[in-house]
Image (cartoon, coloured by chain):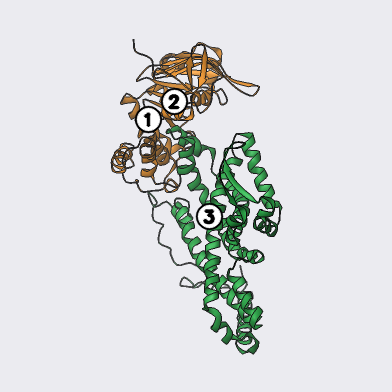
Amino acid sequence: MTEPMLRATSVGKSFGAVQVLRDVNLTVESGEVACLIGPSGSGKSTFLRCINHLEKIDGGEMWVGGERVGYRRVGNKLHELREREVARRRASIGMVFQQFNLFPHRTALENVTEGPIIVQGVNRAEAADRGRRLLERVGLGTKVHNYPSQLSGGQQQRVAIARALAMNPSLMLFDEPTSALDPELVGEVLDVMRDLAKSGMTMVVVTHEMGFAREVADTVHFMSDGVLVESGPPARVLSRPEHARTQSFLAKVL
Amino acid sequence: MSAGVTDAPARPATVVPTRHTGRTVAAVAVLLVVAWLLYSMATNQRFEWGVVAEYLFAAPILMGVLNTMILTVLAMAIGILLGIVIAVGRLSDNVIVSKAAWFYAWFFRGTPLLVQLLFWFFLSALVPRIAMGVPFGPELFSLNTNDLITPFMAAMLGLGLNEAAYMSEIVRSGISSVTPGQTEAAKSIGMTRLQTMRRVVLPQAMRIIIPPTGNEVIGMLKQTSLVLVIGYSELLTSASLIYARTYQTIPLLIVAAIWYLFITAILSVAQYYLEKRYGRGFSPLSTIRTDNVEPLPAPEGKEVRQ
């Protein structure tokens, strides 16, 4: 059996006295699309940020691609990884943010080539070549020289997806990628994500788009108050939820 | 509607802009004052324009201009580089480092520049020899402080170290203006902290940093005249040496002022281009979307509504 892409076992996380994640267990196989759903403040985004070590976990274990996230185990002790090591591992995990977080002082193409050139040491011409192809793939072949401020929200989010893909990630994390978009722009971003899922990318998606989850996800995971309440294929979790909390949440959003 | 318009015109009426009487009066007043100033400057013999012309390009003055510019550039270079280090230190998670950075800014902003300049100049009274070596261990080499601290060195250290304290606050405000999301995005593509600072945070912070830094450079240009007290010969010192001898105080002060104004003008132009460079992606013009914007319908003749 091959190692799963993501394995979280009894992950816990607190901000001060507030415990935001409690005993979260989640396994995502290679090529799987996993959607995390749940009310605001339920810990979905925090869990996602723990996967690439933007937040440190306080308990449990988190593994990505067979490597422990953020720590190295020596004997009976967990040693925190050095910054360079953390950065190297993050480079193979793509992340897309709710607020896009494009670099405003760089054009669409420069946003996409920044990582390959600076982090991976790819030469400029090659990076630009690959960057153009990626922007074409997300439907922005004509916008390569536009600055983020000259693009719509949907276009900016597609550039952000291309920026993450430029690093050739083995896992893509999406943190409510359509929540900051005008309703008419949501579709174009979801289309790109759907194509990405079809191409076999492993994806963990925090989303409120139940239609997308139902159609694209292999597994749906419902979180509430820092606890993973219910997991399973979308047909079951979204249509025939077992837990009362899942039922009451879905009754409100569907 | 105004009472003057009673019957509807057959054709679309032309628009008559409002008269701005106040503006016209102000413009005339300003022009009169300027004309009077120019006239009195030209006719008042005591300005001694002949003397001004005679000394404007005199060798000692040009030497002073050069020294002023060298001192300004070096002191600002020290100020900016050290200022960035102190600003980053101030924002560090390391408590000792951030407190030390705070202390530096407090100390150098809290004592008069004049005192600092004199202090550096008279350093030898405090530390007669400066030695390099292993702390509490053997000495590698040592120098006589008086040989090391020339008036030039004292001027550069005094102005530069003082400037670093002010620059650190300017840089800190710039760094703080960049949203945390930018740092997270940089981390998420695998950048280290140093790469994030150099490639993502500082270039964006520059937009906030440049205008006040322009102020600092122009301020420094004139602040260099303080080094007169430690006998370093810059522009104002050169002028004062001449008028002390010839008693042509006013014309020589005018000569110095002309040079200060000239250099300030050049610096302002440089600042304009720097702001343009670091404003890329931010300027109001670039935020106008040029894609999928439908052209506005052609304006039709404005009509006076009844």
Specify the quadrant of the image occupied by residue A129: top left
**Which percent across, then down, holds residue A95?**
43, 31
Task: Give amino acid for label 2.
Answer: Val
Residue nearest the observer in this picture, B8 or A250: A250
Q: Earlier in the sequence, mark 1 or mark 2?
A: 1
- Considering the image in quadrants, where does the C terminus of chain B appear? bottom right
For residue A198, side relative to residue B162 (left or right):
left
Residue at 66% in and 78% down: B244
**Residue type (three-letter) at the residue carrying disc 3:** Ala
Q: Colour of chain B?
A: green
Dot 1 crowding, Cα within 10 Å, few <14, some 14–19, many 20+: many
Give the letter of the chain under mark 2.
A
Front one among A129 and A193: A129
> Which numbered marker is on residue B96?
none
Q: Are marks 1 and 2 in contact (CB under 8 Å)?
A: yes
Mark closer to the observer (2, 3)? 3
Q: Amino acid at mark 1?
A: Met
Count all numbered tags in the image, as a single digit.
3
- To which residue does mark 2 refer? A205
Kindly identify which residue carries mark 1: A193
The image shows residue B187 at horizontal and vertical percentages of 47, 34
Q: Chain of mark 3?
A: B
Secondary element under disc 2, as helix, strand or loop, is strand
Is residue B44 in sight in this rendering?
A: no
Find disc 3 in the rendering and name its residue. Answer: B77
Observer able to see residue A111: yes
* In this picture, residue A141 sits left or right of residue B107: left
Viewer-side label of 3, 1: 3
